[in-house]
Image (tube, rainbow, N blue to C red):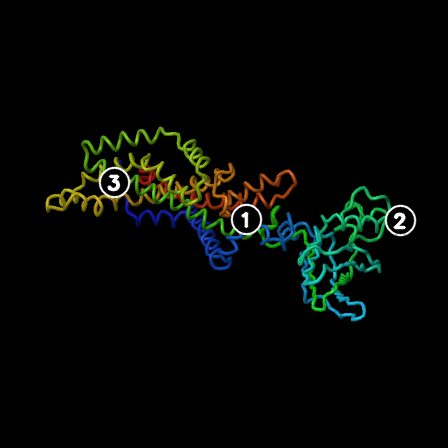
Amino acid sequence: MSAPVGLKYTLKTIFFSKSGLLGTAILIGMLLLSAAAITSVPYDVVKTWNNPEAWQDNPRHAAPEWVTLFTGGNPPRTMVIGPRDFFKVSFFVELASLKFIRLEGNFNYQYDDFPSEWAIILDTVFHDSRPLATIHLVRPDGERVLIFRSVLESNRTRLDVTNRAVRSNVLEWLRGLGVEEPKFVLPEVALFAARSPAMWDPRRATPLQGKYGIEVELVSTGRDDDANASAILFGKVHGLAGTDANRRDLFVGLVWGAPIALAFGLSAAVLISFIQAILGSLSAWYGGKVDEVVQRATDIYLILPFLPILITISIVYRIDIWTLIFVVVALSLLGGITKASRSITLQVMQEQYIEAAISYGASRLRILFLYILPRLLPYIVANIVLAVPSFIFLEAALSILGLGDPIVPTWGKIISDAQEGGAALHGYWWWVLLPSTLILLTASSFAFIGYALDRVVNPRLRER
């Protein structure tokens, strides 16, 4: 076995090889993505990852906006018509003791497809009795469609395409136009379709482009009653990474998944590699009963069913990601690195500078930590690099099995949610492909660096 090499040679091996440079470049990209998560995406957004109310203004199952570079066309983007976009007129009639409020908002729809959904939100303040609300949509062709007319039940009312009264009113309007008898009612299609016999069918209808208007009229009995309105037209493309079934912006999850994946993989790999290397060196340096105990314990650790034990612990205790690191380290205190470190330490012990240190009275711990372990550092670094991908895949696998951290947005958790949401069945490819690609890229970066380090860990390659 050839003599151990230094850290300088290890770094030179990485940066003077094509695979090492490629792996380093990918890893730098992942580190920049991690920095972007910390600087550009506030952590309080991550805290709301599992809060559905925080993502209500995003479309559901929207593809990334950059897909239009390949598919062409002009798919709808999300449009928000806020309270300031509505012109409000209100007055109180003394004789009738009634308060009239009228809100008018306009928007220009110029997209090639129908919105995925829409919603109208009414925020009202009433004191004596609940107000009567009437909402019309004015189309570019002059049609004035009654969408909703009813007494409001609460101060905040959200009307969308799933509302039974809205669907019923749209169905009555379609029948009044004399079109084909609708087989189903999709308000997000019918209200934005050019007039035709099959304007209710998204496969045969065409979008009606132009200026639309939303008219809201409220009647109440309180002089101080007030109301504001807003509307959202949900698009079919959104952001850089699209959205999932819960309307969450996947870019937030993907960006925050980078530091979590790197932190998990590096923490587990560094702790396990150093602990095993130190125990292996102790075993060789002290010998005797210490060596016997460490080696027999290593043999036991090597035959333990690591993954079944980890899965059992995850099922029973539902641990978070940081506790998972502790469990992984605890189950890997001894292993293959322990035996490799013992072998290298036995070789280093025969060198003259170790004998010189012993002769001038250096303590055994001083010799171990200042003279022997530094010679093992290149091998430790190589093992860390080679181990990181396996721990990244481990976290992703546990998350896909539903055993990962249910709160933190990790890449594995996003894939797990995609599996539960039927992403592969319904063609929501971005929900699966983007986190999977980032996992593969991160693992590949360490694999390329590890391939460059073969010259460090394999003596035969160094001798060529």
Q: Amino acid at mark 2?
A: Gly
Name the residue rendered at 79%, 55% in the picture. Answer: 208
Asked if 419 appears above or below 68 in the picture, the reply is: above
Name the residue rendered at 38%, 48% in the picture. Answer: 14
- List the residue tagged with mark 1: 50
Numbered circle sitting on residue 96: none
Numbered circle sitting on residue 178: 2
Where residue 127 sits in the image (x, y, percent)? 68, 63
Residue 333: which quarter of the image?
Answer: top left
Asked if 138 appears above or below 450 in the picture, the reply is: below
- List the residue tagged with mark 3: 3
Disc 2 residue crowd, few under 14, some 14–19, many 20+, Cα 10 Å: few
| Dot 2: element | loop
Where residue 166 sits in the image (x, y, percent)? 76, 51
Where residue 11 sits in the image (x, y, percent)? 34, 49
Name the residue rendered at 69%, 52% in the picture. Answer: 72
Q: Nearer the viewer, residue 68 or 458?
A: 68
